[in-house]
């Protein structure tokens, strides 16, 4: 076993070289923890097929005031899987290929339990609501082989009956039933129970959701699922304030009703403001529209934006339809309309199609997972606008945990604007700008991009950016980051020419607060730019991506 895989098992820790700092803990030798480490290592090896493992320690006290602990592991020969039998049911061939316990592979408790749950899930997804699966291994120590047997007792097959709703007060039972992904008469499936639980949580109306099938509610070949919910407070007020080096001081005030009309509708009145943007809005979000996976949102808003070279007031509204394709995958269609600066000749319409797949393990500070966003947008087709264009944009983020409490984070995003107007030009407010605390950090906010004769940034029609960060934790509350950013914005489509990318490097400090990482980044521009400072500081809440 590699040392990096064993290190997280140990409760005995080395004292950091930064222990002289008041917030970095010192670690002292604890005999009880040392004994627990030995037992934990031995159990870990046995769970992975090393039944003759021996674990010991050597303590070196030659340095005054310090002790070096060495763990000595004699693994012994591993026990390999010999024969694998599945008894009690005809198992599809695809499941045989998915089993972790296969002949010639090292015996593992994790594989045995994973295979047992895989077979159990397959049986219960096929209508056998009370199927059971057991896993047994017969070990021959002399030849270090183990024969594995899975026994399946499927029992009778069931269909869903009408569900029984309990615990609801403000949200109607009919709304909860619309959120379920199964209907009476359908074949029983435990997967649909999990999906239903998630869909009910997504409504935002419930503090807890439990779905179970008590034996007492089983009649003949039907099962009645009990859906027990605990509702959240229907009305809440949210007040927030913050600061970063771009938006400067920010404020938020919002009032939300989580079941405005008894059907799980979320009605929200909100106002937010910063040095860049001020907005007031009313929104209504209706869950379970023509199916448990569909959501419809209506919103009206007034927004005032102020950037370096332009400002505008936008009054408008939009209708958003979302389809939850899978647990973490969403497709949406958004249509909006509005006026710019309250001028009748500035009326616009916008249509957008989008796809989002979010498999990150944490929203604020992910350490593993993948995020993909794709968007196709058209603006200006109706009302005879002379400023019609199409936008194609995409973003991908990837996170991977590494040994030593490190996280590798990467991001790539890009977009292109295609002008369809015979006259006119894509408005400044719609163009791409680069640079800033969530962009290429070697430049200030929106300082990266094409400029006019006076040196003012005018934005571009294409953008490409990428970032790589290596994130390390220092103790419980602090972290360090090293990063490389690259990107470009171009007035046409040269941004996708990799030779034209502008580069920056930097490092940052993170304070891991309960509300998310507070970050301070220092970046140095590597590419030449006569109009931008060589160094930039960025302060904000949350990771850069």
Image (cartoon, rainbow, N blue to C red):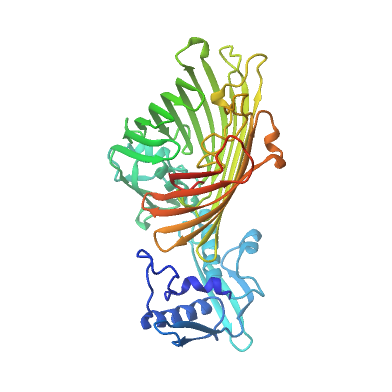
Tell me if residue 144 comes above or below residue 447 in the rendering: below
Tell whether 242 sits left or right of 379: left
- Does residue 126 appear in the picture of this structure? no
Looking at this view, is 429 or 51 the one in front? 429
- Please say if 376 is above or below 501: above
Q: In the displayed structure, would residue 486 be above or below residue 427?
A: below
x%, y% of residue 193?
A: 45, 50
Among all residues in the image, which is located at the extreme top? Answer: 344
Q: Position of residue 532 (x, y in %)?
A: 56, 37
Return the residue nearer the eye: 366 or 167. Answer: 366
The answer to whether one can see residue 194 in this image is: yes
User: Could you say where residue 142 lies in the image, as x and y percent from the top left?
Assistant: 61, 89
Residue pictured at 63% horizontal, 24% vertical: 453
Residue 394, x across and y down, in percent:
61, 38
Q: Nearer the viewer, residue 375 or 447?
A: 447
Q: Is residue 298 left or right of residue 449?
A: left
Q: Please, which residue is most extreme toward the bottom here?
A: 142
463 or 74, which lies in front?
463
Q: Above or below — where is 33 with respect to 390?
A: below
Q: What residue is shown at x 70% (from left), y 42% (from top)?
A: 498
Q: Give residue 81's quadrant in the image.
A: bottom right
């Amino acid at each position: 076993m590699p040392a990096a895989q064993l290190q997280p098992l140990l409760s005995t820790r080395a004292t950091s070289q930064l222990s002289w700092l008041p917030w970095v803990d010192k670690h002292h030798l604890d005999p009880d923890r040392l004994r627990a480490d030995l037992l934990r290592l031995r159990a870990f090896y046995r769970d992975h097929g090393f039944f003759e493992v021996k674990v010991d320690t050597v303590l070196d006290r030659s340095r005054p005031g310090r002790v070096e602990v060495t763990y000595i592991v004699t693994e012994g020969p591993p026990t390999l899987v010999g024969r694998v039998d599945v008894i009690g049911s005809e198992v599809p061939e695809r499941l045989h290929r998915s089993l972790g316990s296969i002949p010639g592979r090292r015996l593992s408790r994790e594989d045995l339990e994973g295979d047992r749950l895989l077979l159990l899930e397959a049986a219960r997804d096929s209508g056998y609501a009370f199927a059971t699966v057991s896993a047994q291994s017969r070990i021959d120590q002399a030849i270090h082989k183990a024969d594995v047997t899975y026994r399946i007792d499927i029992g009778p097959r069931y269909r869903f009956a009408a569900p029984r709703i309990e615990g609801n007060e403000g949200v109607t039972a009919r709304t909860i039933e619309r959120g379920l992904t199964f209907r009476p008469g359908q074949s029983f499936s435990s997967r649909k129970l999990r999906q239903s639980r998630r869909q009910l949580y997504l409504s935002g109306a419930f503090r807890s959701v439990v779905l179970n099938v008590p034996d007492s509610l089983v009649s003949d070949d039907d099962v009645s699922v009990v859906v027990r919910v605990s509702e959240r407070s229907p009305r809440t007020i949210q007040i927030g304030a913050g600061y970063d080096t771009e938006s400067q001081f920010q404020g938020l005030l919002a009032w939300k009703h989580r079941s405005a009309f008894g059907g799980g509708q979320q009605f929200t009145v909100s106002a937010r403001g910063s040095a860049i943007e001020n907005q007031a809005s009313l929104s209504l979000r209706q869950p379970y529209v023509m199916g448990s996976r569909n959501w419809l949102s209506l919103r009206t808003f007034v927004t005032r934006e102020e950037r370096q070279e332009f400002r505008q007031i936008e009054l408008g509204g939009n209708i958003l339809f979302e389809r939850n394709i899978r647990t973490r995958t969403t497709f949406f269609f958004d249509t909006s309309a509005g006026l710019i600066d309250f001028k009748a000749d500035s009326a616009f319409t916008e249509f957008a199609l989008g796809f989002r797949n979010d498999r990150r393990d944490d929203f604020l500070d992910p350490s593993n997972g993948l995020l993909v966003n794709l968007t196709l947008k058209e603006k200006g087709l109706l009302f005879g606008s002379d400023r019609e264009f199409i936008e194609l944009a995409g973003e991908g983020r990837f996170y991977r945990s590494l040994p030593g409490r490190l996280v590798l984070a990467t991001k790539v995003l890009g977009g292109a604007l295609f002008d369809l107007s015979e006259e006119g030009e894509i408005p400044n407010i719609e163009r791409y700008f680069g640079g800033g605390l969530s962009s290429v950090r070697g430049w200030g906010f929106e300082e990266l991009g094409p400029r006019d004769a006076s040196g003012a940034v005018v934005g571009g029609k294409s953008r490409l950016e990428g970032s790589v960060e290596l994130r390390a934790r220092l103790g419980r509350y602090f972290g360090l980051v090293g990063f490389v950013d690259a990107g470009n914005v171009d007035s046409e489509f040269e941004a996708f020419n990799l030779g034209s990318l502008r580069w920056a490097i930097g490092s940052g400090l993170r304070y891991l607060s309960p509300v998310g990482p507070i970050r301070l980044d220092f970046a140095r521009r590597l590419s030449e730019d006569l109009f931008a400072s060589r160094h930039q500081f960025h302060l904000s809440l949350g990771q850069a991506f």
